[in-house]
Image (tube, grey):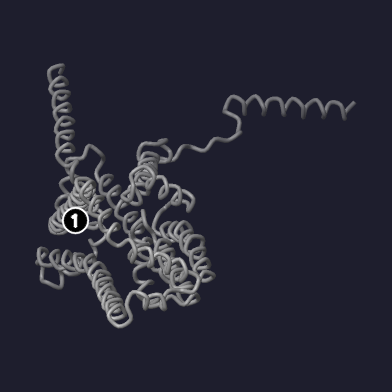
C-alpha cells in the first residue's frame, strides 16, 4: 500500500513537471493559442453547420472559417491603406501644381486666415535660409542615423512579431476547429473531476467568450454610429470613411474610437474651424470614449450568469493586468471562479442540497411516546380532581 502511494506521488510530480514544461514551450505563443481557443469556441456552431453542408468534411469547413477571418482582418487594413495612399497622392499632386503655377507663395491662399501670417513668416525664413536649413537637416540625419535605424528596426521586428502571432493563431484555430471536439472528449476522460464537470466548465467558458466577442463587435458599432453623428454635425469630410475607421479602432483597446474623433478635430482645426474642432474633440472623448464603459458591460452580461457590475470590473481589471487580452481573460477568470463555486456547492456541498439526496425527516414539536403517556396521566388526574371538587 505504501509502495502504491509512493508511486502515485511520483506520477503526480511527473504530471506537474510535464505541465510546467508544456507551459514553458507554449509561453511564446500564449496569446495566439488563447485567442485560437476563444475563436474556436465562438465559431463551434458555425463549424458544425458548415460541416453538415459540406457532408462531414470538417477540414473544408474549418478552412472556410479561417479564410473568412483572414479577409475580415485584412479588408479594413487594405481599405485604410488605399485611402491614405490615394489622399497623399492627391495632396502631392495638388501642391506640385500650385507651386508650378504660382510658386510657394501660392500655397498661402489655401492656408486658413488665422494661420496665414505665421505660415508666411515660416515661408520667408525657409526661402532665405534654405541652404543652412538643408545643412542642419543633413547634420541631424548623420548624427541621429543610428538611432533612426534602430527605431525602424524595432518597428519592423514588432510588425514581424505581430504577423507571427497572427499566423500561429490562425494555424491553431484551424486544428481546433477540426479536432476540437475530440480534444474536449480527451480532456474529459483524463480529468480528475467527476464526469461532466469538465465539459460544464468548458461550456461556461465558451458562453463567456461568445458574449465578450459579441459585445465587443456591437459596442464598436455603437461607438462608430455615435462618432458618425459627431462627424455629420461638425461637417467632417468623408464622414462615412471616418466612421468605418472608428469602428476598426474601437476594436483596439489601447486606441479606441475616440482617437479618430481627435484626429478629425485636428483636421477641422487646421482648416480653420476651431469651434467645431473643440466640439468634436469633446464629443469623441466624453461621449464616444465613455460609451464603451457603459455599453459593453450591458451587452456582455446578457450571456453571462453574473451581475453587470462584476462584468464591468472584470473587463477593466483584466485590461489593467493583462493588457488587451485581458478583455477576455478578466471575464473568463471571474466566470471560472463562479462556476467552480457553483459546481462545488451543487456536487460537494451539504448532503441535503445534493440532487437525489434522501429528504431529512421533518422536525416537529410533538411529544415523544414517554412524554405523551405522562401528559395523558396528568390530564386524567386533573379531571378526577375537578370532579371531586364539584361533588363537594
Which residue is at a point 17% across and 28% down the rendered structure image?
12
Which of the 4 image quarters holds residue 101?
Answer: bottom left
Where 371 sits versus 343, above or below?
above
Instruction: Name the foreground residue: 306 vs 294.
Output: 294
Where 175 sits versus 88, above or below?
above
Which of the 4 image quarters holds residue 122?
Answer: bottom left
Residue identified by numbered label 1: 166
Which residue is at a point 14% across and 33% down the rendered structure image?
18
In which quadrant will I find the C terminus? top right
Left or right, 250 with respect to 156, comes to right
Instruction: Name the foreground residue: 102 vs 165.
Output: 102
Instruction: Name the foreground residue: 303 vs 249.
Output: 249
Measured as percent of width and height from the top left, residue 341 is found at: 39, 40
Check the image and name the residue furthest to the front. 128
Measured as percent of width and height from the top left, residue 112 is found at: 46, 74
Which residue is at a point 26% across and 58% down the rendered structure image?
134
Left or right, 128 with respect to 389, comes to left
Amino acid at each position: 500500500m505504501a509502495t502504491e502511494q509512493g508511486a502515485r506521488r511520483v506520477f503526480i510530480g511527473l504530471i506537474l513537471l510535464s505541465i510546467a514544461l508544456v507551459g514553458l514551450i507554449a509561453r511564446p505563443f500564449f496569446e495566439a493559442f488563447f485567442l485560437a481557443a476563444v475563436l474556436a469556441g465562438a465559431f463551434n456552431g458555425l463549424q458544425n453547420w458548415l460541416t453538415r453542408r459540406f457532408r462531414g468534411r470538417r477540414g473544408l469547413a474549418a478552412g472556410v472559417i479561417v479564410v473568412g477571418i483572414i479577409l475580415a482582418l485584412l479588408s479594413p487594413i487594405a481599405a485604410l491603406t488605399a485611402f491614405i495612399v490615394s489622399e497623399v497622392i492627391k495632396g502631392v499632386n495638388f501642391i506640385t501644381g500650385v507651386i508650378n503655377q504660382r510658386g510657394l507663395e501660392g500655397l498661402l491662399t489655401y492656408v486658413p486666415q488665422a494661420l496665414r501670417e505665421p505660415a508666411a513668416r515660416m515661408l520667408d525664413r525657409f526661402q532665405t535660409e534654405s541652404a543652412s536649413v538643408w545643412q542642419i537637416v543633413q547634420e541631424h540625419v548623420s548624427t541621429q542615423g543610428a538611432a533612426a535605424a534602430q527605431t525602424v528596426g524595432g518597428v519592423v521586428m514588432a510588425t514581424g512579431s505581430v504577423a507571427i502571432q497572427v499566423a500561429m493563431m490562425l494555424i491553431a484555430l484551424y486544428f481546433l476547429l477540426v479536432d476540437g471536439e475530440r480534444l474536449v472528449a480527451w480532456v474529459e476522460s483524463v480529468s480528475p473531476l467527476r464526469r461532466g464537470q469538465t465539459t460544464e466548465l468548458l461550456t461556461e467558458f465558451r458562453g463567456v467568450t461568445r458574449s465578450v466577442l459579441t459585445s465587443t463587435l456591437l459596442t464598436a458599432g455603437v461607438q462608430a454610429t455615435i462618432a458618425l453623428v459627431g462627424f455629420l454635425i461638425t461637417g467632417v469630410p468623408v464622414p462615412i470613411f471616418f466612421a468605418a475607421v472608428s469602428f476598426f479602432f474601437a476594436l483596439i483597446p489601447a486606441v479606441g474610437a475616440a482617437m479618430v474623433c481627435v484626429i478629425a478635430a485636428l483636421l477641422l482645426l487646421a482648416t480653420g474651424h476651431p469651434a467645431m474642432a473643440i466640439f468634436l474633440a469633446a464629443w469623441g472623448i466624453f461621449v464616444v470614449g465613455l460609451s464603451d464603459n457603459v455599453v459593453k458591460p450591458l451587452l456582455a452580461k446578457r450571456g453571462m450568469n453574473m451581475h453587470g457590475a462584476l462584468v464591468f470590473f472584470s473587463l477593466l481589471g483584466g485590461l489593467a493586468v493583462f493588457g488587451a487580452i485581458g478583455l477576455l481573460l478578466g471575464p473568463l477568470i471571474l466566470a471560472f471562479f463562479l462556476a467552480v463555486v457553483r459546481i462545488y456547492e451543487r456536487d460537494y456541498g451539504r448532503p441535503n442540497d445534493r440532487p437525489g439526496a434522501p429528504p431529512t425527516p421533518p422536525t416537529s414539536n410533538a411529544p415523544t411516546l414517554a412524554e405523551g403517556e405522562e401528559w395523558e396521566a396528568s390530564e386524567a388526574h386533573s379531571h378526577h380532581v375537578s370532579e371531586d371538587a364539584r361533588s363537594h
